[in-house]
Image (cartoon, rainbow, N blue to C red):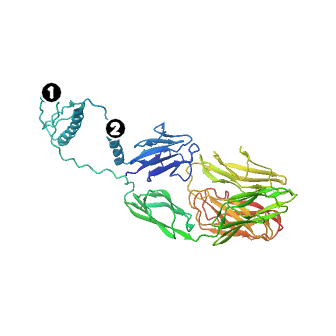
Amino acid sequence: MSLGKLVEQESGQVFPLGFEVVTIGRHEDNTVVVPDPNVSRHHAEIALHGGRWAIRDLDSANGTFVNGRPIQEPHVLRHGDLIRIGQSQFLLEFPAAAARHDTLVEAATMPLRPRRSPWLAVIAVLGLLALAAGAFLLWPRLQGEEEQATPPPAATDVAVGGATTLPSPAAESTLPAPGETALPTVAPPSPEPTLPPAPSAEASDTPGVLPTIGVFRANPPIIDRGRCTRLEWGLIENANRVLLSDIGRVGTSGKIDVCPGESKAYRLEATGAGGTTEESIQVTVQEPRGSIIEYLRVVPSIIAPGGCAQLEWGKVENATEAIIEPGIGGVGTPGSMEVCPAETTVYELTATSPEGTHTARASLIVSSDTSQKPVIAFFSARPASIEAGECVTLAWGKVDYAAEVTIDNGIGGVATPGEAELCPGARTTYRMTAIGPGGTTEAEAVVDVSPVGLAELADLVVESILFEPNPCFRVGKCEVRVTVRNDGPVDAGAFVLRWAPEGAEAVPVEWDVPGLAGGKAMELTYTWLPGATHEAWPTTATVDVYGQVDEIEEGEGNTLTQEIAVLEP
């Protein structure tokens, strides 16, 4: 099977056709990612059908066009076809051998017009053979025409049964008997001339240059036994063959999910005219940890005496039993129920597994004092840095103690938690405002928009600081969860993340992070024992404390402050 490639016409970027299915769309999980708001998240796919490439529209909003015409059904592609998706155009190119193959296939499958007599078809075929034989016999004469004093005799075209034949100079003409159909006389077949080999479909490497592997990673590199990880590779140059251990031959870019039963190293080999380059990555398989609770929360988190709230909990993994106390008992997950306590209550969800237990807490405050300012769990843009024409997801968490929550820039009133997809054309600051009986709280999310073609760097952002329970209690365990995200296209490498509450007595905590892949997020946790009460205790998380990472926007989004109420137990 010959490989081909898609060439984006404006940028010249090349996308090899190296797999049976090539997906095109706006979402990052596509083989070809088109950051265009006019392109659907999963817009179209190119796949092999009967040994030939065909494109199919995936019910996109704006359609898929081949050579200016919209397609309704899977469309067989040919060398030189122009594919338009959104505002982007891709030229389809096949190697010479593949292009010739497509032409021959098309000719062989072309329907024939009806003939008056089957003899006419035979005459046509014999005529074509005579044409080929005659042309070959004339070849030596044509080669030596400069040396000959007398030019060769001119060939005579003879029409027979609608076909044109070139009679051999050595052939003698015979007249047909009355009532018979004239058949051409064909010279004996001559040996076929030796043609140079067709260019290889895989000869895309540069002679003498060692192949390079730009990307080869496992995400995540550490998994629980029975789970899977995704191997990703790309930016491979000067290679005509790429092998992945346990998988076999692959394309120059791609991704695949693997589920090893034990820790192992995966090896990627890229071979070209200049030699072979190898890279390995280690996937570590660990024993499953204790049970994992997705979340436990009460909405709202403060009520007046006699009021009720909704207790909600998410999925619990690796657990044989889930119990909520006080007064609820065993529950299925996920789930919810109405609770109407007479006093402030801390609800505790305990999940039990063979490896141990895990506990989540949520506090419901019963108070006639409604002076607490609104608390915004988080407000962020993902990613915080984009190129012109790309979109972001504006996301926000639960907002407590608020009667009204709005976002500016034309969004208006929103429910919490929630998210919205936006495509700003320039740097934009989005502001969330929460208004309640106790006052007003605001949060901002900034989106940087840069010109297309910005250098490939990391871009670290502190996305959120969450507390469990919320509010916390003095000298009680309060779990701090800090989420950091890499909005850049490449791995950030090693960096330090710091979190600390405000005050001279507060001791900061730092995490040494070995790396974070482009477009990925990571959550780090810390068990905090607050030593004093506070209505709104400011805490701050800072990523890349020591400036170890070169970022697209140095300093932008690297710091986030979040307040937490600490109550007397």
Q: Residue furthest right?
A: 368
The vertical placement of 349 against 118, above or below, is below
Mark 2: secondary structure: loop
The part of the image, by quadrant, that contains residue 344 is bottom right
Q: Position of residue 451 (x, y in %)?
A: 59, 48
| Amino acid at the residue labelled 1 | Gly
* Vertical arrangement, residue 287 with respect to residue 57, above or below: below
Between 17 and 512, the one lying in front of the other is: 17
For the image, the number of numbered tags is: 2
Residue 365 vertical placement versus 173 (above, below): below
Q: Element at badge 1?
A: loop
Q: Position of residue 158 (x, y in %)?
A: 20, 31
Q: Dot 2: within a 10 Å radius of its alpha carbon, few (fewer than 14), some, or many (20 or more) residues?
A: few
Contact between labelled residues 1 and 2, with CB atoms less than 8 Å apart: no
Residue 4 appearing in the image: yes
The answer to whether residue 9 is visible is: no
| Foreground residue among 563 and 19 | 19
Residue 360 vertical position relative to residue 448 in the rendered view, above or below: below
CA gap between label 2 and label 1 equals 33 Å
Is 139 left or right of 25, judged from the image as shown?
left
Sequence-wise, the earlier of marks 2 and 1 is: 2
Identified by mark 2, the residue type is Met
Front one among 402 and 538: 402
Rendering coords of residue 128 (x, y %): 23, 37
Nearer the observer: mark 2 or 1; the answer is 1
Residue picked out by circle 2 = 110
Q: Return the residue at label 1.
A: 179
Residue 188 is left or right of residue 45, and the answer is left
